[in-house]
Each structure stands twice: as structure tokens, then as C-alpha cells.
Image (spheres, rainbow, N blue to C red):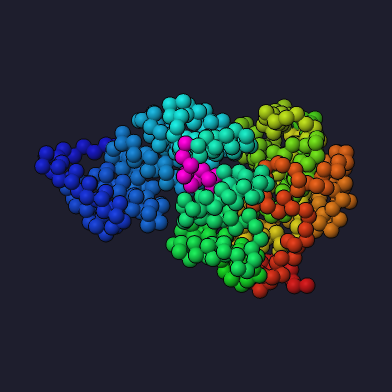
Amino acid sequence: MARTTKLSNSKRRQVNLLVDQAAAALNQKRYDLCESLCRRLDEIEPGNADSASIYGIVATQMGYPKQAVQLFKRAIQAAPKRCEFHMNLAGLYLMQGHLEAALESYRSAMQLKPHQLEIQLGCVSALIALGRYSEALTMMEAAHKRQAQNGAVLLKLFRINYELGSLVEAEAWVKQLLAIDADHAEAHYSYAMLLAEKGEKQQSECEVREALRLNPADSDAALLLSELKIYAQHDADVDLIACMYKKAKEASVERIKLCFAYGKVLDDLGEYEAAFGCFAEANGAREQAESYELDPELAHLQLVMEGYPESVVNQQLGVDDSSPLFIVGMPRCGSTLVEQILSSHPDVKARGECGYFEQALSLTSSKEEPLTLDAITAYQAEQWQALGRSYVDLLQGDAEVVAHYTDKTLSNIRLIGAIHCALPNARIIHVRRHPLDTCLSIYKHNILGASFAYGRSLGQLGYYYRMYQQLMEHWRNVLPAGVLYELDYETLVADQEQQTRALLEAAGLPWNDACLNFYKTDNAVRTASFMQVRRPISSASIGVWKHYEEPLQPLMKILGITAS
């Protein structure tokens, strides 16, 4: 309800002055003064909207997001037509990863000011995070018609096309931005990432150095630089990244990224104890900042196994289409390498971690009828067929027509039953790697996304890995012979040609020599493995866990592994 208190002109002037003073104190981060001024505001005008909003901003900056949400809501209740209050709430929701709530708040702001670019940019950020790229593209293309030279618009157009895999268009947008503003640090970083994923390492390094020259505190650029090469003693970049790490505020987002960057450098140098300290610091800070509960996730995976007995999985009611090649496994298991090998074949197009199957499932649900595990497993033939067709349409999209398309969405491990019901002729390739090498690599890398939040703690990582093993054992038992092909990373490294031949046969593909030279394929690689797949197969990453045996003891105990 809006504020109804009627103030005299004198008190209104006093309130306006206090609001200005509190805002100035906020800009100077003088939080004590800010609080004092807001208390005086509330004494003169109880329930003042600006006071609640300023309190909310302080709570946000002090690291109290729950309190901030309530304060921003209080401000909106007091003054529902103040667009900036909806923006504050939307931005906080976006920062917390509450994407649907963020989008709803941005849309509320947009109703008040339909053409304000700042609101549109925020709305597009939420849409991108939700994977709703076509909606985001439509909005930014309209904004571009009004403001063709706006750097923020051009950068969003780059990002949307990048996420869509339209890399030619993405590169064109970022080049257009750099032509307008050659000193745009974020554009240089974005271009560097695109070049790195295309395998253009030297050009990427030039761009990332330019980003760091323009913004010496750019933690994203430092993280990318740490991945672009193997570090040795006396490398000047060692001191650069170490200095950035030491200067960053503890527990900040920047510090977390720099922990991973500096930890990687120290790992290259063989300083394993110090490296693990960096990884532990990063994961500890992220675990504190994020809300994640492992038990509900484990319980859900248990229900998935119970919901897909052999009688459900083998109904054979879906679409007769063998074009999808699903690649599943844990993060850092070697799945990117397997996709790169397959996509080096002329009959295969890589679609990466597209998330299309889950997207196709979501299209069958609504707010009135939300999708549940029980509802999915009770699908009839026409529903499975509709799901299969919807998925294949998304997978093929506007890509070139080939015999097969890879889908490397790792979270599909929990959807394998539904995948087989909808697409009984699709092949599923399960990539395995030594449990300790897999878990350590997850812990060492800056893997983002709620689906992988278990990786912040060695304990949670261990218990999740155990459940993953049980889940894959279940699929192994209930799927018909020939559907699930399992490939061990270590075996592939030890005998590349024989294992590649077996992989292609399992995928229904004829032999092609290009699959042995996968590192020459010019696909863009969108995962943390983008540098590894640009080099020939190597055994360098096998047994790395032995360097970290002492700090990994809690994980080894959970997994039941003893040192060899």
C-alpha cells in the first residue's frame, strides 16, 4: 500500500534533504551515517520508501541479501510506481540466481518505463541466464534500432549470439563495438574468450592482455590468462596473477576467481600445497555465499531411479530418430574430448551443453500443471513422441544438416530414462574417469551453475559422486543392450585409435581419420577444457590426484579409496 502520511511543506523539505544526505553517505560507503539519517527519516515519516530502499542497498552491500529483499519489497509497497525500487529488487534477485523472480521484477519496472535501456539490459541478463535467448535477441535487436552505437547493447548482442553458438555473428558484434570504442575492456575480454574457444590461442592472449591493460583488476581476464598456457618459473605472469590475488578483497567474487587463477598457476609450478590452499579458499567462500542443500538432490536422484524401472524405460513408445548422440558423465570426466573426437567426423555436428532436452520437457509444463517426476513417467505414447520431436527440433535448429548431433549436457544423467523413452534409438555415451581425478578437477575449476554446486565441498562432492555411481549402475541395468556405451578416459588415452574406432562404431559412424586429429578441428569449445582439446591426447592429467593425496583424505574415505 502506498504511503498516505500527509506532511507539511517544511517536513517534506526536511525529508527530501535527509534522503539526499543518506544517498550521498551511501555513495561514500559511510554506512553508520547512512543508518543514522534513515532513522531520522523514519521518525519524521514512518514507512518512508526511500529509507527502506537505502537500507536495502546497505544490506546488499554488507552481504545480507535476505534482509535486502524484504527492505526492497517494503519500498515497493510504499511507492509501487517508483521504477528504481523494482530495479533494485530485480538486480538483487539476479545476483542471487533467482532468475524467474528477477525477470518478473524487471518486467514490473518495464511497465512503468517501457523504453528505459537500463531495465531492458537487466531483463535481457535474466533471459540469457534462463536460456531464453530468442526473447533476449528480439529485445536487444529492437534496442539496437534505437541506439545503434550503444556499447552495452552491442555487448549484449555479442553475448546472446555467443550463447546461441552463432559465433560469426557474435564476432561481428564485438568487432563493431571495438571499432566504436577501442578501449572497451570488457569487449576485449569477451573477444579473447571467443578466440580461445575457437582455438586461436595467440590472438586470444593479445586480447586478454589488452583487457588487463585497460582494467588491471579484471579477475575474469586473469582467470582466462591462467588457462591459456602452462606456467613455468620466472614467467612474468606468475607475479602478475599473484599480485592481483593478494590485492583482492577476501571472499569477494573477484578474489574467488583469482583463487582459481592463482591456484592453477601454482599447480603448474608444482607448488601443490599452496595451490590446494587457493582452491579451498575459493570453494569455501563460494559455499558460504551460496545456499545449496545436498540431501534434497540425493533424494531426488533416488526417486529418479525408483521412477524408471525397466518396465517404464523399455516401453518403446517414442520417436524413431537416431540423430542425437548424448554424452553424459560427471564434469571434468573427459566428455569434452569425446565430443571433440565425434564432432571431427564430417557426419556429426557438436551442440555442446545445450540443455535442449530439459528445455523440451519444460515446454510440456505450465504454472497450472507443473511438471513432476510422476507425471513424466506416466506419459503415453503421444506425449513421449511429442517430447522427442520437440527435442530433435531444438537440437537441429538452424544447424547444417548432418546425420548426428552431439548433446553434451552433463546434467542429463538424471534424465536418461526419459531420454530413452522419448528417443529409443538415440545412443548414450557415458564417459568415465578415475573418481579422484574427476573430483579433484571439479574442485580445482571455476565451474558455475546450480547443477554443480556440490563441487564446493569435498564432503558433498564425495557423497554426490557415490550417488552418481549408483544412478549410472541403475541405467546400466535397465537400458536395453546397445543403448548405453561406456568409455574410460584412461583407456582412451592409452589406446587412442582402437578406442576411437570402438566409439565411432557404437555411435553408428564409419571410420574417419579426422577423428584421430580432433585437436585440429575448428569447433568452438565452451567448457573449462577448451585448451586441453587443442592439443594431442596426453597422459599428463592422469593420476594428478596423487599430488594432493593428503588434503583429499576426507574425499577418499567417503569414496572408499585407499592410496595405491
Query: In the picture, residue 422 is in which quadrant?
Result: top right
Q: Which residues are magenta?
A: 180-190
Q: Can residue 264 be seen from the camera position used here?
A: yes
- Magenta stretch: residue 181 in it? yes
Q: Position of residue 52 (x, y in %)?
A: 29, 47
Horizontal relation, residue 142 to residue 477: left or right: left
- Give the overall secondary structure of the magenta segment: helix
Q: Position of residue 505 (x, y in %)?
A: 87, 42
Among the 4 quarters of the image, the one containing residue 332: bottom right
Q: Position of residue 17 (x, y in %)?
A: 18, 46
Relative depth, front residue between 76 and 155: 155
Residue under the point 19% across and 43% down: 16
- Image height of 64 relative to 482, above or below: below
Of 76 and 83, nearer the camera is 83
User: Which residue is painted at 80% across and 35% down in the image?
Assistant: 347
Quarter that holds the N terminus: top left
Residue displayed at 80% across by 47% down: 517
Which quadrant does the C terminus fall into? bottom right
The residue lying at 67 percent from left, 29 percent from top is 397
